[in-house]
Image (spheres, rainbow, N blue to C red):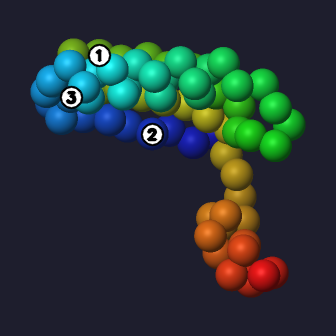
Amino acid sequence: MAVKIIDLRTVDNEVTQYLLDMEKAAIMSVVNPNVLRGLKVTQNNRFCFIVTELCNGGSLKSLIRSNG
């Protein structure tokens, strides 16, 4: 699994709060064999944790560069 950690001190206005809420909703709602599955979203008073499946093998960018 992979964990994205977001410092909630950077969510300092309505726009960034909205974007974070949309990201959390999108991660947890997408069901597609070609997209990483969202496993859990949780937060405390300082951080938001978005847990997803882990994709080994590098980034999409490096895969495209290698294979054209």
In this view, the mark in front (2 or 3): 3
Q: In the structure shown, which secondary structural element does the residue marked by tag 1 occupy?
A: loop
The structure residue drawn at horizontal position 29% and vertical position 16%, both measured from the top left corner, is: 44
Name the spot of residue 38 as percent of width and height, x first.
64, 27
Give how far apart the Cα atoms at labels 2 and 3 are: 15 Å
Residue 11: numbered disc: 3
> Looking at the rendered structure, which numbered label has been put on residue 4?
2
Labels 2 and 1 touching (C-beta < 8 A): no
State the SS at label 2: strand
Residue, x 46% and y 22% (percent of image)? 22
Mark 2 and mark 1 lie on one chain; the one further toward the N terminus is 2
Q: Please, what is the three-letter code of the amino acid marked with disc 1? A: Asn
Q: Where does the C terminus fall, quadrant-wise?
A: bottom right
Locate residue 42, reporting x and y percent. Answer: 43, 17
Give left or right: position of 55 versus 13.
right
Residue 46, quarter of picture: top left
**For the residues bearing labels 2 and 3, Cβ distance under 8 angstroms:** no
Under mark 3, the amino acid is: Val
